[in-house]
Image: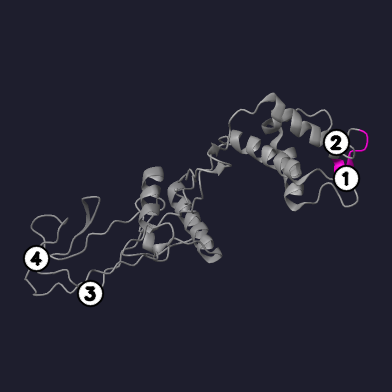
């Protein structure tokens, strides 16, 4: 069967450097001089180990164009993590001035971030509640099911049972959905190996002394039930005490399926 199982705020902060001189906006185009300065730091302090010949830590930074940092973000992310932790250059090796060190790190981060796609935020995994599940089955398979027969009741939040935060998923609930899908798929294809039984109980607030909505005119009491027969075959109907109220002589009992009388 086809399964149906189972939704940004940007703050701009002005930052100022020196006396009234604004910092360049993130993503702005750097000059050739800026890129060359960072390339000099990289060449002087990093390429000595990370070149095509040595490939220390299986990383080569030789002949890489800093103007194309965003095109190889995965590689430069490794470099940024090492710079952020202060692990490179390693102890005992020459290190650049702090301003040049931080400048290279910030340059790499800004180049990657300025070209990266906007973060869409987090999304809570939202499963279907029982009503939505039954509607999905009806739309996909043209089956009317009573979801309460297959799934447990849903948790509610502030009176609503379709809030993503309340519709949690547990291993037990997943197994329940899988079991429900198995039974419903059998109903959809008309395959059923073993006899099944369904029990319907009339509502306690339904009067048996007058016509019930959905029943034929001229009748009183009884039950109107929607049931999906899983396969062609012979079915046995057993009707127990309906509590029809006051007895009326010559009154008849009628059983109809799809509007057609099958027993009287």
Residue at 70% x, 30% y: name it: 34
Q: Quadrant of the C terminus?
A: bottom left
| Residue 188: % across, % down | 43, 48
The 10 Å Cα crowd at callout 3, few under 14, some 14 to 19, many 20 or more, is few
Horizontally, is 253 left or right of 114 in the view?
left
**What residue is pinned by disc 3?**
241
Q: Secondary structure at mark 1?
A: loop
Residue 158 drawn at (x, y percent):
33, 65
Asked whether the viewer can see residue 237, the reply is yes
In this orientation, which residue lies closer to the viewer: 3 or 118? Answer: 118
Asked whether disc 2 touches disc 1, contact meaning CB atoms under 8 Å apart, the reply is yes
Report the Cα–Cα distance between label 3 and label 2: 95 Å
Mark 3–mark 4 CB contact (< 8 Å): no
- Give, as a single range, the part of the protein colored magenta: 53-60
What kind of element bears circle 2? helix
Q: Nearer the viewer, mark 4 or mark 2?
A: 2
Quarter location, residue 213: bottom left
| Residue at disc 3, secondary structure | loop
Residue most extreme to the front: 19
Instruction: Estimate the x, y position of residue 40 in percent, counting from the top left.
Output: 80, 32
Rendered position, 4 above or below 40 = below
Label 1, label 4: how many angstroms apart (C-alpha)?
Answer: 97 Å
Q: CA distance from mark 4 to mark 2?
A: 96 Å
- Mark 4 or 2, nearer chain start: 2
Give the numbered dot on residue 44: 2
- The residue labelled by disc 4 is 210
Q: Which residue is mark 1?
A: 94
Q: Earlier in the sequence, mark 3 or mark 2?
A: 2
Front tag of 1 and 4: 1
Q: Is residue 229 visible?
A: no
Residues under numbered marks 4 and 2 in contact, where contact means CB atoms less than 8 Å apart:
no
Task: Give the alpha-carbon distance from disc 3 to disc 4, as whole Å.
Answer: 17 Å
């Amino acid at each position: 069967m086809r399964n149906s199982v189972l939704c940004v705020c940007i703050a701009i902060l002005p930052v100022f450097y020196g006396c009234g001189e604004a910092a360049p906006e993130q993503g702005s185009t750097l000059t050739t001089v800026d890129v060359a300065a960072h390339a000099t730091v990289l060449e002087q302090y990093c390429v000595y180990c990370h070149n095509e010949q040595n490939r220390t830590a299986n990383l080569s930074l030789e002949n890489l164009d800093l103007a194309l940092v965003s095109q190889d973000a995965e590689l430069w992310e490794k470099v940024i993590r090492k710079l952020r932790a202060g692990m490179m250059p390693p102890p005992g090796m020459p290190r650049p001035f702090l301003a040049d060190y931080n400048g290279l790190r910030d340059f790499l981060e800004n180049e990657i971030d300025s070209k990266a796609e906007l973060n869409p935020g987090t999304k809570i995994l939202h499963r279907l509640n029982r009503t939505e599940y039954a509607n999905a089955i009806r739309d996909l398979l043209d089956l009317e099911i009573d979801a309460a027969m297959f799934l447990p009741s849903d948790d509610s939040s502030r009176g609503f049972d379709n809030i993503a935060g309340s519709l949690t998923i547990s291993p037990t609930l997943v197994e329940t959905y899988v079991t429900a899908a198995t039974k419903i798929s059998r109903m959809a294809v008309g395959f059923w190996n073993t006899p099944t039984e369904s029990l319907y109980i009339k509502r306690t607030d339904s009067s048996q002394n007058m016509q019930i909505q959905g029943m034929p005119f001229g009748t009183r009491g009884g039950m109107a039930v929607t049931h999906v027969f899983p396969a062609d075959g012979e079915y046995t109907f057993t009707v127990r005490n309906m509590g029809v109220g006051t007895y009326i002589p010559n009154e008849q009992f009628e059983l109809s399926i799809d509007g057609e009388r099958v027993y009287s």
